[in-house]
Image (spheres, grey):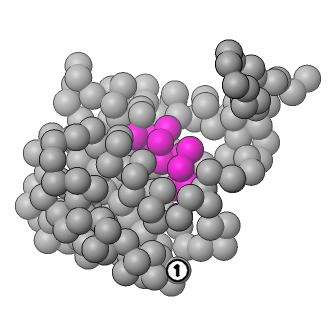
């Protein structure tokens, strides 16, 4: 995971009043499950700020940024593109091929919100369905990243963390660096 090419998640689309929390969760899930950065389309600066604050506290590396040109971001991407959609091929049929390609090339994972333009489907090297049933894009991203990294992301070490969650059987415990 450490020496592999970049994994970037593009959050495409945002429904104001409905998706700010969902967009934030896409970014936090990308961070927690092994991606290197998230790019958010549509000026949702509050989500970027929250993701950056979590990264500052709980470690990185991870970055979050905005784009006003998501279609050109996809078009100009210098690697392979995966579009997560319930209409795509089942993940279990393409995960090995995607993983093998990612060993050589950066990977852009496109996660939609509102109706995704058809040109994204055409630009994708793979349109992937985690399930072909309606579901949360956050859940789809989590399953995809876990399959991509084969669970290795769960043992990741975080750099420059001032906060660390201490696993406990019950309750909550967070240690803070003095």
Q: Residue furthest right?
A: 178
- Locate residue 175 relative to residue 86 in the image: left or right: right
Q: Which residue is mark 1?
A: 103
Q: Quadrant of residue 13?
A: top left
In percent of width and height, residue 39 lies at 41, 49
- Identify which residue is drawn at 52% across, 80% down: 103
In percent of width and height, residue 81 lies at 32, 70
Nearest to the observer: residue 47 or residue 29: 29
Please give the range of residues in magenta. 26-35
Q: Is residue 53 magenta?
A: no
- Locate residue 62 relative to residue 90 in the image: left or right: right
In percent of width and height, residue 162 lies at 79, 31
Q: Residue furthest front?
A: 169
- Locate residue 1 relative to residue 10 in the image: left or right: right
Main secondary structure along the magenta-highlighted residues: helix
- Identify which residue is drawn at 77% across, 37% down: 161
Quadrant placement of the N terminus: bottom right
- Identify which residue is drawn at 23% across, 53% down: 131
In the figure, 22 relative to 79: above or below?
above
- Locate residue 117 relative to residue 103 in the image: left or right: left
Nearest to the observer: residue 43 or residue 164: 164
Q: Residue furthest top?
A: 171
Asked whether residue 142 is in view, the answer is yes
Q: Is residue 34 magenta?
A: yes
């Amino acid at each position: 995971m450490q020496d592999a090419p970049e994994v970037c998640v593009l959050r495409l689309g945002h429904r104001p009043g409905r998706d700010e929390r969902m967009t934030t969760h896409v970014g936090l899930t990308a961070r927690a499950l092994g991606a290197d950065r998230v790019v958010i389309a549509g000026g949702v600066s509050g989500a970027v700020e929250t993701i950056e604050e979590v990264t500052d506290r709980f470690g990185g590396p991870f970055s979050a940024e905005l784009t006003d040109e998501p279609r050109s971001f996809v078009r100009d991407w210098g690697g392979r593109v995966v579009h997560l959609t319930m209409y795509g091929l089942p993940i279990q049929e393409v995960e090995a091929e995607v993983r093998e390609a990612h060993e050589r090339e950066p990977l852009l994972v496109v996660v939609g919100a509102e109706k995704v333009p058809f040109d994204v489907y055409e630009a994708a090297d793979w349109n992937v369905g985690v399930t072909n049933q309606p579901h949360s894009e956050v859940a789809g991203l989590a399953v995809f990243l876990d399959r991509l990294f084969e669970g290795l992301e769960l043992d990741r070490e975080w750099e420059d963390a001032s906060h660390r969650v201490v696993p406990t059987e019950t309750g909550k415990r967070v240690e803070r660096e003095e």
